[in-house]
Structure formats: structure tokens, C-alpha cells
Image (spheres, rainbow, N blue to C red):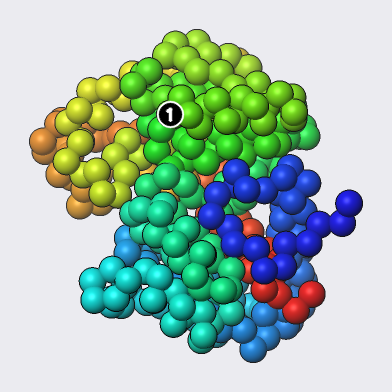
Amino acid sequence: MPVNLRGRSVLSLKDFTPEEIRYLLNLSKDLKEKKRAGVRGELLERKNICLIFEKTSTRTRCAFEVAAFDEGANVTFLTNSQMGKKESIEDTARVLGRYYDGIEFRGFEQNTVEELAKYAGVPVWNGLTDMYHPTQILADFLTIMEHVNKPLNKVKFVYAGDARNNMGNSLMIGAAKMGMHFVALAPKSLWPSEELVDAMKAVAKETGAVLEFSEDIEAVDGADVIYTDVWVSMGEEHLFEERIKMLKPYQVNMDMVKKTNNPDVIFMHCLPAFHDLKTEVGIQIQAEHGIPEMEVTDEVFRSKHSVVFDEAENRMHTIKAIMVATIGNL
Ligand code: CP
Ligand code: NVA
């Protein structure tokens, strides 16, 4: 069946079929090759795009902007609007939908991005909420396709750390859809919600995915990918002490990498990462908790296993694919 994503919002990969996800990954690959070949893009010519950010960002904002510019679109970066303060989300969506062809939203509540999508009348793309980070997953899977010499449905993917945050949730959804062997390696209290797990187990039945939940580090055995994310996500900064205690045993270090028994295992992280003392937060954590690295050691981060900057580059190609597929002049 041909895939047609025109006019669709991207709020979570839960709403997409494996075929549609595969289509976006293949389109990303084509757009990456096109850029490398220096071909001028016109697929978003005359489109206007609004980028709403309640939370901070480096990759997502820049990836949306560069992707838009590459294909001829214009962007507005909106970080101090009336939305939610003096004007409802519904009214804001109705206004922005009159100006723009597509709207990206990064912020706290999943409900906000859903409300925007309900009323804007144009595609809305989730650039991260507390619950989900769907555009990141496409970049991650494209990176796996480039670095792991196996089809996605043969890949063993271990996510170590806070498995119930936006990344843990979204990676589990993506893995279930693509038929992967997904392991959430985390203390039980940080596993994804029962509701989401049950929904994804139903998806896994269809796709052949295996979803595993473990507190035991030995579960990394045979992994093709070890993935981690920050232990404390944006908006949870009061939880550092508790999370450091809970997640220290799940730090991605060379011992964990060796336990995979796979010399070709790749290390992934959506970034930003706390792997050294070159950040304000890193220095503060070292002063207060006495640890120089958190979710990943500097050794692993800089090792031959690490593909984190390829992953960061792929944010741009995959976000471009989402915009082209949903609002582009195809
Ligand atoms: N990975 C990611 O979303 O990065 P930013 O927070 O810099 O956008
Ligand atoms: N879980 C992280 C992801 C950052 C890209 C956060 O929400 O802060």
C-alpha cells in the first residue's frame, strides 16, 4: 500500500504504522544523500514554519531550522508567546494555523501538543514533551541502520537508565513498531507505565518485537546497541539526588560495554550528555554529589563504540523528512 503522510501531525510514533516509519526512514536517507550531493532543495519552497519552544534546545531547534532552509522554507522561532498565559492553546493554534503551514512544539505537557494539533488545521510536530520525543527516534533508528549490519528487526537494543522518560517511552514504542528486541534496563520504579507497556506488547505481537524489562546488568549480553539518556530530564531538576542513587549502578561504562560480549556494540545518546566536567550542571553535581560523570563515562562517550554525533546529524535529515512528507511539495 502506498504511504501518504500529507497533512499528518507527528505527536507520537504510536500513531504510525511500521510501514509509515520505514517510509520516513527511507526518505531521510534519500534527503541525506541529496544534501551530500549538493542538490538544491525546493520541497518546502514558500512554506512557513513556526517553532514553539517552552524548553531549551540545541539540536531540535537547529535541525528544524536548517532542514527548513535547505528545502526553501521560512521559520519563526517563538519562545515568548501569549500561549497559555493570556491566550488559550486552542486560540493560539487557530491563529498560528492561519499563518503557518506547519508548527513544531517543544514543551512540558503532551496535552499541549495534542491540543495544538486539534485546532491548528495544519500539521503539528512534537519536538519533545515530558512523555514523548518522536523525531529523535527516527534519527536514532537511521543511525542504527547506518552502523549495525542487521535489519532493525534483528537488533538487540538495550536502554539503560530512566526508562520511563520521554526517551525510554519513545524508544520502546519505536522498537515495538519495528520488531526489535528492546530491553529496558532500569530499577523497576523507572520502567515505563503499565498502560504503555501493555499497548506496546500488543503491537509487539503483530511485529515480532520482544520487549524485556530488567534490573540486572547482565541483560546487556548480546546487545547491538546500548542507549542512555540523562538521569534527570528537563523540568525534574529537583530529583538529582534520588536519581543518582537509583541509577548509578546503570551508568554506561566500559564494564557494561564489555558485558555485551559484542566488540561491535554501538553506544547511543540523544544528547546533551553529562560525561565530563565541562558544563555548569556537571560541575555543580560534582560539588554536591562527588561524581564527575553521570549516565555515561567520558571513556565510553569518546570511544570507538560511540556514534552520538552521527545520531545528532541525523536529527536534521529525519526532521527534514517529516516536514517534507507532511507538508512538502512532493
Ligand atoms: N536531543 C535533543 O533533543 O537535543 P536538544 O535538547 O538540544 O534539542
Ligand atoms: N530526557 C531528556 C531528553 C533531552 C533531549 C529531557 O527531556 O530533558
For residue 285, what is the image quadrant? top left
* Up-down relation of residue 183 to residue 118 (above or below): above
Where residue 135 appears, as percent x and y from the top left, is 56, 54
List x then y, in percent, for residue 64: 53, 69
**Residue where numbered disc 1 is placed:** 193
Please tell me in which quadrant of the rendered image residue 164 appears: top left
Residue 207 in the image, given as x and y percentages of width and height: 74, 30
Task: Give the vertical position of 121 relative to 29 (above or below).
Answer: below
Q: Secondary structure at mark 1?
A: loop
Left or right of 171: which side holds 277?
left
User: Does 239 appear above or below 81?
Assistant: above
Which residue does the image show at 67% across and 69% down from the upper left? 7
Total marks placed? 1
User: Is residue 179 shown above or below 118?
Assistant: above
* Residue 159 seen in render: no
Q: Nearer the viewer, residue 104 or 154?
A: 104
Position of the C terminus by quadrant: bottom right
The answer to whether residue 330 is left or right of residue 205 is right
Give whichever of 12, 256 is nearer the camera: 12
- Residue in the image at 27% along x and 22% along y: 246
